[in-house]
Image (cartoon, rainbow, N blue to C red):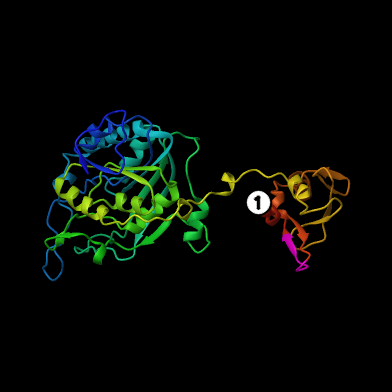
Amino acid sequence: MIAKTTSRNELPLDRILWGDCVRILNTLPEKSVDLIFADPPYNLQLSQELWRPNMTKVDAVDDEWDKFGGFAEYDRFTHEWLTACRRVLKDTGAIWVIGSYHNIYRVGSVLMDLGYWILNDVVWLKTNPMPNFRGVRFTNAHETLLWAQKVKGAKYTFNHHAMKSLNDDLQMRSDWEIPLCTGKERLKVNGAKAHTTQKPEALLYRVILSSTHPGDVVLDPFFGTGTTGAVAKKLKRHWIGIERDKGYIKVAQARIDAVQPDMLSDDVYAFPGKRDRPRIPFGALLENGLLRPGQKLYFGKTGNVTARVLANGAIKHNGSTGSIHQVGREIQNAPCNGWEHWYYIDDESGERVAINALRERVGAK
């Protein structure tokens, strides 16, 4: 559904709003959005046509929406839309902005001037970049994403373990190798590209999965052909798109309508981290009969350092008595997560197992 305006008291979820992004953002409720993904004009400042060696013309970005009178005009534009975005973001919210060398440094400067706190810069490495046909510079094979929180030090969403799982159980790095949007994913109208800078869904999948939970609201002030909305719908997030080109809106709406909602429960799309789990004290292992007073614990999967479990939930190593964390800290003279450092002997296998496995059993009850 396309809407021209909205009430300050109503958040237009899962809709495309037609018009200027700054004007529309200023009509939305304050502190109502969880995440913003912005793909603003890059201010490429192309001064001539581009041709391949075989004399075919390059379908480059020469749209009117990417033309500015100069850096000062572009900076004013950037300041306006980032200010409007900051107003609608929750204090725990965050923003992702993508750009190229033409604009991303100016965007970053404005972000910091407005009080955003940059968390990461992520490099999108294009596995199939467009060649530099004139041969006067290196091929532009990457774009940069800035991830920033609205308020420095506020709690923000980062699904670390979900991203680790997405990356074959390795911590995901800040360089993302993803191909350009091509083939069937590239939307076309009458055989021509529907949008010159359509982003691949794989890129938005990482952004949205890493920075939101199911039911969160993701806003895109430069909606284009609706990549953000399509991916948000697939991941069971709400979305709001703002776009001033009716041609793009028509393509985006058809694209999002084609995404079929599923009947799967939210736990397919939600990935609570360790900090989201209920706190379980070490003493609960004694109360539930998973450990017994006097039982021996081992510090590390190998080695001879041991401690005895006391009936009150403390442990004793030589003359030192305290929690699993305190005693572990004294042993290694460094911060210690006792759940991961202390081991018990499993009765069935006869092998050492981290006591964290017992905590998981208590939490599952």
What residue span does the magenta drawing correspond to?
Answer: 348-353
User: Total number of numbered labels?
Assistant: 1
Other-residue count near label 1 (Cα within 10 Å), few / some / many at <14 / 14–19 / ≥20: few
Question: Residue at 11% across / 67% down in the picture?
Answer: 56
Q: Is residue 70 above or below residue 169?
A: above
Residue 264 falls in image quadrant: bottom left
Q: Is residue 309 magenta?
A: no
Q: Residue at x 11, y 61 (%)?
A: 190
Do we see residue 255 in this rendering? yes
SS at circle 1: loop
In the picture, measured across the screen, residue 340 lies left or right of residue 167, that is: right
Q: Main secondary structure of the magenta part?
A: loop
Which x, y percent locates residue 183?
Answer: 24, 67
Camera-nearest residue between 328 and 258 = 258
x and y percentages locating residue 353 in the rendered image: 72, 61
Quadrant of the drawing holding the N terminus? top left
Residue 301 seen from this side: no
Q: Is residue 349 magenta?
A: yes
Q: Most extreme residue toward the bottom, as rendered?
A: 54
Q: Residue furthest right?
A: 319
Question: Which of these two is toward me, 3 or 86?
Answer: 3
Hey, what amino acid is under mark 1? Lys
Q: In the rendered view, would you say 75 is above or below 198?
A: above
Left or right of 363 in this view: 78: left
Residue 245: image quadrant is top left
Q: Position of residue 65 (x, y in %)?
A: 17, 44
- Residue 169 image offset from top left, x and y in percent: 53, 62
Instruction: Report the residue that reaches farthest toward the front.
Output: 263
- Between residues 118 and 228, which one lies in front from this camera angle? 228
Residue under label 1, please give it: 365
